[in-house]
Image: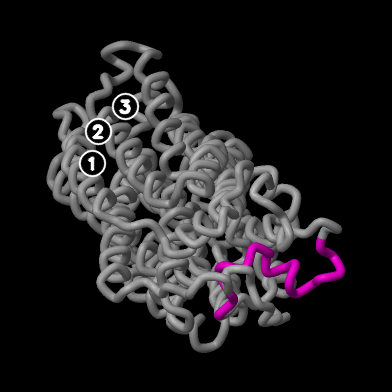
Amino acid sequence: MSLDNAPSDSALIPDGQARKQDLNRAAWACSLGSALEYYDFALYTLASALIFGPLFFPEQTRAMSLIASFGTYFLGFAVRPLGGVLFGMIGDRVGRKFVLTSTVLLMGVSSTLIGALPSFHQVGYLAPALLVILRLLQGLGAGAEQAGAAVMMTEYAPRGRRGFYAALPFLGIQLGTILAAVVYFMVVSGNDDVIESGLWRVPFFSSVVIVALGLYMRLSLKESPTFIRLKALKRVSVNPLKSAMKHSRPSLLIGIGLRLGENGGSSIYQALAVSYIVGVVGLQGPVGVLTLICAASLGALTVPVAGMLSDRFGRVVVYRAFALLQLALAFPVWWVLSLGNVVASIIAISIALGIGTWGMFGTQAALMPELFGSRHRYMGVSIAREASAVIAGGIAPLIGAGLIALVVASHDGDASAGVGAWLPIACYLTLLTLITLYTTFKTPETLNRDLDEPRDAWEIAHPATAPANGSSTATGTA
């Protein structure tokens, strides 16, 4: 399904394509800013899989401690839609730059304070309560970061290269994940008393540096050309949430559907699989951290390549190809993980996550902003991304931990029986991926669409379904 090349109202203003210098500055600010912010988020992912259980939930069995730890992980995703709506409203009314500056501050401060938390043995239930509060604040910032970076770069990039440039902030996320894993490896490797010694706090305290660097880069960033033209035309919506809910319901459902396989797969491989091979299969040493380093390194290559491929062949067909790859790998990869071979496990997760899952991630960078009209683009991307983050990303490790606990319980509490949970986990991943694959056949092709156009891609591709008072004629009152 292709879009019509309908003229937009922004033709009243010269295109004003961002100068090369501004484009490069935006690419650096969004990419490195995302890398620094998702260093924080990846730290929490590793910690929830490896150490938060005994630190904050020591009175539970191993299985229940893992569930409780992943429960706090899920809460960060649960609050992300609220952060998406809150900052999406600001991003569509005040501007993209303000939000990107705010999120780096919020996430950096929250992560630094996590490093200062007392353990359960020190203050009892106050410790997990404080962890939950800081995780919620972290989730609020994450709910707007990816959406803002993707929207900013998509609106800055020249037509024909949006896929590549929009993928750069997502490349930054891989770099942030690698940085977090390397720091964790340096701290954990060779230290059997990492919890008792307090060494686990060091990576979180380093977030102070992240706050300073992130603020410096984001404050020097200029506003996106599309938003500048919206303000000049007096078309900035005063209620982006109302506008998105009125005109973008098909686009929101498409965005959520596209994200289920990608975001669910990302959380399943990054958090659940790491915990599974270490805590259930019993692989020794820092194998979980090494696995994430290898996967993210491969993902750092895949993400920009996926963006470039989408510029050449189209967003939808490339997204579908990576979804098919994830689908084909689901059962073989989880079977390999159950075997307990270190090298095979690292290779399996690296290919499944680094190519299949993060290939969708890189393609999604430009596709998601292009789905929505200019007046509620930040809001639309935020809602679609973060609603799916709750439905798939946040709850996936929790469901996986529950499946492991059920398998163990069905074998009279024999912890070694948890290895057999690989089959239901693979089935769950397959279900999420099939939903995403189906969604690609309902997604309009957005390649090279006019980003100043106030209508959604769905409205242009299906004019008969547009509301009577479509967003193309809406006024500033939304």
Residue 453 in magenta stretch: yes
Q: How many residues crowd mark 3 within 10 Å: few (<14), some (14–19), many (20+)?
A: many
* Helix, strand or loop at mark 1: helix
Q: Which mark, residue 153?
A: none
Q: Is residue 278 visible?
A: yes
Point out the frontmost of discs 2 and 1.
1
What is the three-letter code of the residue carrying label 3? Answer: Leu
What is the residue that sits farthest to the bottom in this orientation? 312
Point out the frontmost of discs 3 and 1.
1
* Helix, strand or loop at mark 2: helix
* Residue bearing mark 3: 55
Q: Is residue 12 above or below residue 271?
A: below
* Residue bearing mark 1: 211
Inter-mark Cα distance, 2 to 3: 17 Å
Q: Left of 127 or right of it: where is 373?
A: right
Pick whichever of labels 3 and 1 is earlier in the sequence: 3
Residue 374 in magenta stretch: no
What is the residue that sits farthest to the top in this orientation? 123
* Residue bearing mark 2: 112
Marks 2 and 1 in Cβ contact (< 8 Å): yes
Looking at the rendering, the stretch of residues picked out in magenta corresponds to 448-466
